[in-house]
Amino acid sequence: MHIKFNFKNFEPSDHLKNYARDRFEKLSKYITNNDDASLQVNMEVEKFRHIAECILTGKDLHISANEETEDMYSTVDLSLDKLEAQLKKQRDKIKDKKKKSREKQQVRMDVVSFSPAEEGQSREPRIVATDHYEPKPMPLDEAAMQLETLGYDFLVFLNAETERVNVVYRRKDGDFGFIDPGV
C-alpha cells in the first residue's frame, strides 16, 4: 500500500510523520490487493483545529474519512479508526456474499410408484428414484417460457427476484400455475 502525506499550514515533525505512517500501515491487513491500494492523507492546521482527511483507493475500493480535533496525534488515531471500521464493514459484506453464493439451494426430486395391490390391501407408494440438482436463477416469466419450450409439466427454479425456490406448473386448462412457498 502506498501512503502519501500532504501538510498544510504547518511543518510536521519527523516523529509525527513516522507515527502516522506506522499507524496507517496497519490498514494493509484489511486490503486483499495491497499493490494497487493507495492512501492519500491531507493534514492541516487552522488556528486550534487539527484536521486530517484520508482517502483510500484501490481496486473496487474508495473509502474516505475526515477528522478534526485539537491534537494532530489524536486526529490521526480517530481517522484511522474510521477507516478501519469502514474496511471491516466492507470485508464482512464481501465474506457474506461469498458465503451466500456457496450456499446454493438444492432441490430433491423423488419419483413415486405404487406397488400393485393384493386382494384386500391398498396400494403402497414407494420411492423409485431420487434426483438432486441446483435450480437455475431466473425470473418468473423466463421460467414459464422455459416450461413451455421444454414441454414439462412443472419446473422448479430459483426466483431471481425473491431468491427463493419456486415452482411453475402447467394446469389442465393449459395455463400456468405458480407456487411460492415463502412468505
Image (cartoon, grey):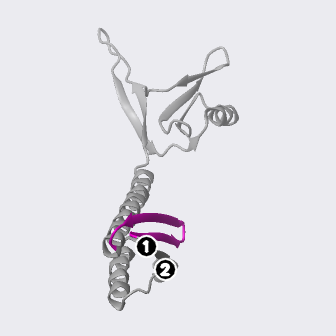
Left or right: 102 in relation to 55 = left
Q: Which residue lies under the disc numbered 1?
A: 32
Residue under the image location 45 percent in, 64 percent down: 65
Could you tell me what secondary structure mostly forms the magenta stretch?
A: strand
In this view, 157 is above or below 39: above
Specify few, some or many for label 1: CA neighbours under 10 Å numbering under 14, 14-19, or 20 or more. Answer: few
Q: Does the residue at mark 2 contact the one at mark 1 (Cβ under 8 Å)?
A: no
Q: CA distance from mark 2 to mark 1?
A: 35 Å
Residue 34, x across and y down, in percent: 45, 79
169 or 178: nearer the viewer: 178
Residue under the image location 52 percent in, 71 percent down: 57
Residue under the image location 48 percent in, 64 percent down: 63
Quarter of the image holding residue 143? top right
Looking at the rendering, the stretch of residues picked out in magenta corresponds to 48-71
Identity of the amino acid at label 1?
Thr
Residue 167, x across and y down, in percent: 52, 30
Residue 43, x across and y down, in percent: 45, 76
In this view, 82 is above or below 56: above
Specify few, some or many for label 2: CA neighbours under 10 Å numbering under 14, 14-19, or 20 or more. Answer: few
Identity of the amino acid at label 2?
Asn
In this view, 183 is above or below 128: above
Q: Which mark is residue 9?
A: 2
70 or 2: nearer the viewer: 70
